[in-house]
Image (cartoon, grey):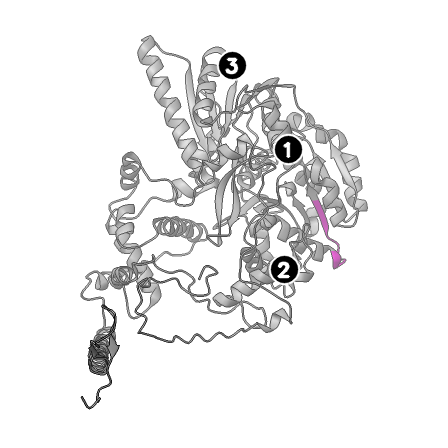
Amino acid sequence: MRSGAIWATEFQTEFNNDEGQKVILLFQDTKPPFLDGRVASAKQAEPELPLKDPTSDMAVISHSKFGDILGVEKTAEQIDADKAAVGEDGEVDFKEDTKFAQHLKKDGAVSDFAKKKPIPQQRQCLPIYSVRDELLQVIRENQVVVVVGETGSGKMTQLTQYLHEDGYTSCGIVGCTQPRRVAATSVAKRVSEEMETELGDKVGYAIRLEDITGPGTVIKYMTDGVLLRETLKDPELEKYRVIVMDEAHERSVNTDALLGVLKNVVAEGRDFKLIVTSATLNAEKISNFFGIVPIFHISGRTFPVNILYSKTPCEDYVEAAVKQAMYIHLSAPPGDILIFLTGQDEIQAACSALEERMEQLITLNQKEALKLMVLPIYSQLPADVQVKIFQRAEDGARKCIIATNIAETFLTVDGIFYVIDTGYAKMKVCNPRMGMDALQVFPVSRASADQRAGRAGRTGPGTCYRLYTENAYLNEMLPSPVPEIQRTNLGNVVLLLKSLKIENLLDFDFMDPPPEENILSSMYQLWVLGALSNVGGLTELVPTVFFCPKEREEESDSAREKFFVPESDHLTLLNVYQQWKRNDYRGDWCDDHFLLVKALQKAREQSRRALVSMSTSGMECRAICTRAALYMEADALLSEDKKKHKEQEMAMEEELEILRREQAEAERVSKEEEREKRVKGQQKISMPGLKRGLTNTRPRKLGL
């Protein structure tokens, strides 16, 4: 039962020795043909955790933190704000919250350098400009090139423009992949400004459910997931002349899969260029992966950074970061602050604490203090709020940006002079007991810590406050991050590669190949769940792998029947969404009806983004929800077939109950007869001459 092969059930611990019952269990050891005689287990293998020493102070502190599995509960103010966003027709004004393109045009120059010099001079001052000709020559002579660009070198914005200026866009598109959505949108916006073109014309971007490109787009920024999806329709990527993979050292699952796919594209031998940018630690590894290709180094434009360590480990690093930010704001020279935290919940708590303390400061001093603009940045933040970090602060004010690890390399914000590094980040790891991936807090690597410190030296000499000890940096942190493919459930990787039409996963070119037994075990698990066929391909219709809460099956089923629409499962889901909307999108309503509030919130966001895509493409949006009103009442949800089915079930239950009673009565009568026989056959009599207390059993007929 512990292995999961048999469901654990309640059983009696008191047994009657006179009773006996045989239970026959039939096991059939069936193996799918794609295993080809190899051994596979349904047990999830232990992942490689991104920890150097599980007993270290930082590891212990990180274990006390939880990841964003269930999300953050909205406050009353946030709920009111959501309601206020709903118009008279009941539809949410989604455009202002989700569309990056509209908001990316609002910011202007931030630093003094950007204000005083025009864009052409700014480009010429970047370190990459001094090696422009040498870099282009290396690209001409090689099909694959690894570029190592230090912080501030300008590779993210200039490399694609150099390729365009060198004529590569005359017969194709120059594509650039980014691991993060915000990075793809912000870099595309900057490049469009430098090329003096509208965003979506010559320069565009494509992220999930938002494509700001046109027929004349020659430079396209996108997430690596978008390019992977394009390989489904165009495996050879024929419309691209050059692909630039930026930040390949992040080693996400999509990045590793894309590296393997692009290696196959390069092997085709057509006129195609691949440029991979990476940090120094992974450059040689990537070069060897593509067959010892050349590595081109670009120096960065950085200023010295003074690094200060904490004397003791900080258990409550959120509070410590807030205190340090207030100290900097009240005593340090002008300059913006950047704080690294792990997720949305911590960022919201830190923002609230800073705003509250600033209000208390003004109240106690009875005068205006230097204004502190507290700006959060994380992936789920609306677009109009995200772009505020790039905008110039008000005169006499200081910006305090509170971010996740998205600000390590993907975002470049001018004016940062102070960095507060808590030393932690959320990483996706596999939980073998749950059998699924979850976000958990872990200490960052030394490479990530160095990247965070480098954010303070972009526009001038800066200071990095590390809320951990120097010993922790040297002895408790890994030198580089663990690739995501080695610490997550391989089932997701298998499904991803199978969707990319890759038949033999054991022959796929992984940069860090997982053990063969782990891949086979993941494929076996997916086969058991019905996601893979007997030959190892994706099934057309995957049955659900979710189940209701244990010991609450009947309650969950009855709650589900309230939303049932017999004509279609899709209408049932639509009915669920409409009912949630009628109940003001409340989370407690979802809990009462056994619904996942985060899944419904995701559906709400997806519907907004879908409407954005339809609107931008000129498609007419028509309402299809009019029939939902037919299924609002619970009594009207069950069709005649459903009622008949339930009546049959009830009749069957009654028959089974009668049979159980008859069987119990027959067993009782049988036991009673056996007991009477034993009493009659074992009558005891006293015999003279025997010791007191001894008895002798007399036969039924003695003739006395």
The secondary element bearing badge 1 is classed as helix
Callout count: 3
The secondary element bearing badge 2 is classed as helix
Name the spot of residue 579 as percent of width and height, x first.
Answer: 26, 55
**Mark 1 or mark 3, which is nearer the start of the sequence?**
3
Who is closer to the viewer here, 102 or 664? Answer: 664
Q: In this rendering, is residue 493 above or below 284? A: below
Magenta segment includes 524: no
Image quadrant containing the C terminus: bottom left
Q: Which residues are magenta?
A: 267-275
Residue 19 in view (yes/no): yes
User: Residue 517, labelled with which disc?
Assistant: 2
Q: Residues within 10 Å of mark 1 (few under 14, many from 20)?
A: some
The mark lying in front, picked from 3 and 1, is: 1
How far separated are the C-alphas under marks 3 and 1?
28 Å
Q: In this rendering, is residue 54 above or below 14? A: above
Q: In this rendering, is residue 643 above or below 210? A: below
The secondary element bearing badge 3 is classed as loop
Residue 243 in the figure: left or right of residue 82: right
Q: Residue at x 52, y 12 (%)?
A: 333
Quadrant of residue 478 in the image?
top right
Disc 3 marks which residue?
A: 334
Residue 499 in view (yes/no): no
Q: Residue at x 19, y 66 (%)?
A: 636
Q: Residues within 10 Å of mark 3 (few under 14, many from 20)?
A: some
The mark lying in front, picked from 2 and 1, is: 2
Disc 1 marks which residue?
A: 447
Q: Residue at x 47, y 20 (%)?
A: 325
Name the spot of residue 528 as percent of width and height, x first.
Answer: 50, 67
The kind of residue on which mark 3 rests is: Pro
